[in-house]
Amino acid sequence: MNSITIGPFALSTPLFIVMLTLLCAVALAWLLEKKYTIKIESRLWLTAIAGLFVARVVFVAQYWEQYQTNLLGTLDIRDGGFSVAAGLIAAAAMALYLGYKSVGLQRTAFVLSVMTAVVVGGSTFLWLGVYKKDAQPLPLQTQLQNPWADSAAEQTVTLENFSGQPMVINLWASWCPPCRREMPVFEAAQREFPQLTFIYANQQERAETVEGFLSGQQLNLQHVLLDQEGDLARFARSRGLPTTLFVNSDGSVQAIRMGEVSRATLAQYIEQLR
């Protein structure tokens, strides 16, 4: 599962897990503070901040080349660029340190709050199947429209037309702000990774709307197609845009990401393709 829908909001699964974990742990810490007149909530926030900070710093260091031309991008965490392993290690180290510095009932309550975070985060991770790495096949017979083709016969294409090499399929819409922001990133990636096929499957908009957006933004994108029935979004089980599918040369889906990408996070996913 790549996204969670809560009312009108769609959250990526990793973001949902982090938010739920923090919510449960902080709620328990707040209740224990009120009942026993102790201070542990601030320690819990320090643990979370340490983990997130180190996770971001390590990720930026790993992909420094992509951030060099946009230093402010290192602060823009909307791209989801975090080193999970580094973040977990940092959070665990901070929790151990703060637990050691605590005494008596304060230590017990802090450890209980941290264990609540571990149990909630771990069980949600397993329940949502984030750990599953079995690559699912891309529905190559999915029909997409190309109203700008030279002949009527070429106006309907299938993904099978592009099979045989790795693909990056971006699901987008012109009304979607993060979709608009990440388009220049994809345009640059086309030049940087010529061995890949980039497909931009617009979700249920009219051809005139798409053409007006592309010309207005002066974008030169490889394969802009119309997914008028939203078939690819249903396949990806994603309720939010943008969503990007990373497909191996054998047609298996390596990864599906919901949310805006930066040069760094796009490079991270492309590295996994084979």
Image (cartoon, rainbow, N blue to C red):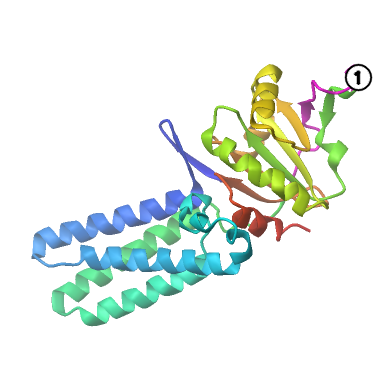
User: Is 9 left, or right, of 44 in this rendering?
Assistant: right
Task: Please report the residue visible at 41 percent of the width from the left and 55 percent of the height from the top.
Answer: 18
Secondary structure beneath dot 1 equals loop
- 253 sits left or right of 75 in the view: right
Task: Give residue 271's position: percent from left, percent from top.
Answer: 71, 61
Residue 240 picture location, percent across and down? 53, 36
Q: Which residue is mark 1?
A: 151
Overall secondary structure of the magenta section:
loop
Q: Check residue 152 for magenta coloring.
A: yes
Of residues 3 and 180, which is closer to you in this image?
A: 180
Q: Position of residue 207 (x, y in %)?
A: 71, 19
**Where is residue 261 drawn, in percent x and y?**
58, 48
Depth order, front residue of 172/134: 172
Segment colored magenta:
137-153
* Viewer-nearest residue: 101 or 149: 149
Task: Find out whether residue 186 is within the magenta segment.
Answer: no
Task: Tell me if residue 127 comes above or below residue 211 in the rendering.
Answer: below
Q: Amino acid at mark 1?
A: Ser
Residue 136 visible, this angle: no
Task: Let me know if residue 272 appears in the view.
Answer: yes
Name which residue lies at 71% across and 50% down. Answer: 189
